[in-house]
Amino acid sequence: MKYSWPKFDWVLIICAVLLVSIGLVAIYSATLDENSTEFIRQLQMAGVGAVVFFACSLVDSSFWSRHAAFLYLVMLVLLGSVLLCGTEINGAKRWVSLGSLGNFQPSEIAKLLLLLVIARFMAGSNDGVYGQRPPLVRKFVFAMILVGIPMVMVLKQPDLGTALVTAIVGISIIALGNVPLWWVFSCVGAGGAVIPFILHDYQKQRIMTFLHPEEDLVGSGWNIVQAKIAIGSGGIWGKGLFMGTQNRLKFVPEHHTDFIFTIIGEELGLVGCICVILLLAFLVGRAFQVACAAKSTYACMVAAGIGVFWAVHAMVNIGMTTGVLPVVGSPLPFVSFGGTALITNCAALGILNYLSSRRSC
């Protein structure tokens, strides 16, 4: 492994720090009356994330490329540990208990590991990684299998939102590998046709609720309706920090995790929402800018994959919070409560920072 003192991409760092700060304030507001430890835990995880960011900024990108097979094995072991000895919360087995350290969610790390692995495989002999490039059809099929295995394992938890994000990130990188786009769209279409037959009843109910939330305002439609009320009630400037009535009276469930955008909308208003969206857009745009400037196929794919990784999470989270998408459960990058998600985003930020500071890699 090669190490060198990192240079810092301050656009990336400032955007991430501002998002984490907004998230900490929102989590503090969400748990203000509960005498809970979520704020302290998230603050601690932010410190761990800073160390992870610095460490990943030191590591040469070739390290991830050379050890792609090992990373994939680690990913499968992590996802398998959930199925074997995971902790069940709210009917889903997505976490592994670490005792006093809290719960660890392997599927969050799996998304980043899969990104690094698929980029390595699709880069192929373009960077001299393989001695001979495999036929394109075989390469495409094998890449889809690499994406499909962890996706199925996540679906088993069950976690439809994470499974879909995992698939989108992996398929996006495959699409960058000079394969005909109709191959990609055909596989996506086939997968979409299968999904209705593998959904659990509660997942089907979420989709029906998304289409007609008004039919059960105090039942399955409660989350969507209350989230939209909270965001809309904030107006232009918001009600002020710690003054959100929907938040303080606990009308919105999971308002410090999946629905944290409702707190931002209610207490900071449209202005606060736009600021968060712009910060996320700057991060995503910077990732694609790094991808365009990269001089190796692998670096290009990793940077673009990280951009897709953040963009999909943001769109899914904000979309479900505002009623544009069904409720599937997806954290808002750097903002939502969750140590594993925050540390994973910090690792992705560190890898992108390395690629940004060394465009020749």
Image: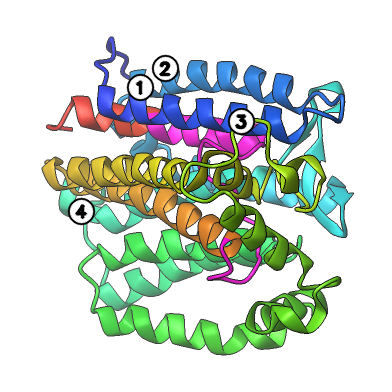
For label 2, the residue is 54
Viewer-nearest of labels 1 and 4? 1
Amino acid identity at mark 1: Ser
User: For mark 4, does the 10 Å Cα neighbourhood hold few (<14), some (14 to 19), or many (20 or more) residues?
Assistant: some
Residue drawn 85% across and 71% down? 218
340 or 266, nearer to the observer: 266
Mark drawn on residue 125: 4
For label 3, the residue is 241
Of labels 3 and 2, earlier in sequence is: 2
Location of the C terminus (image quadrant) = top left
Tell me if residue 94 is in the magenta stretch. Answer: no
- Distance between the Cα atoms at labels 4 and 3? 53 Å
Amino acid identity at mark 2: Phe
Majority secondary structure of magenta residues? loop
Report the side of 354 relative to 163 (left or right). Answer: left
For label 1, the residue is 57
Q: What element carries label 2?
A: helix
- Distance between the Cα atoms at labels 2 and 4? 30 Å
Q: Quadrant of residue 118?
A: bottom left
Q: Is residue 127 above or below residue 324?
A: above
Report the side of 119 relative to 247 (left or right). Answer: left
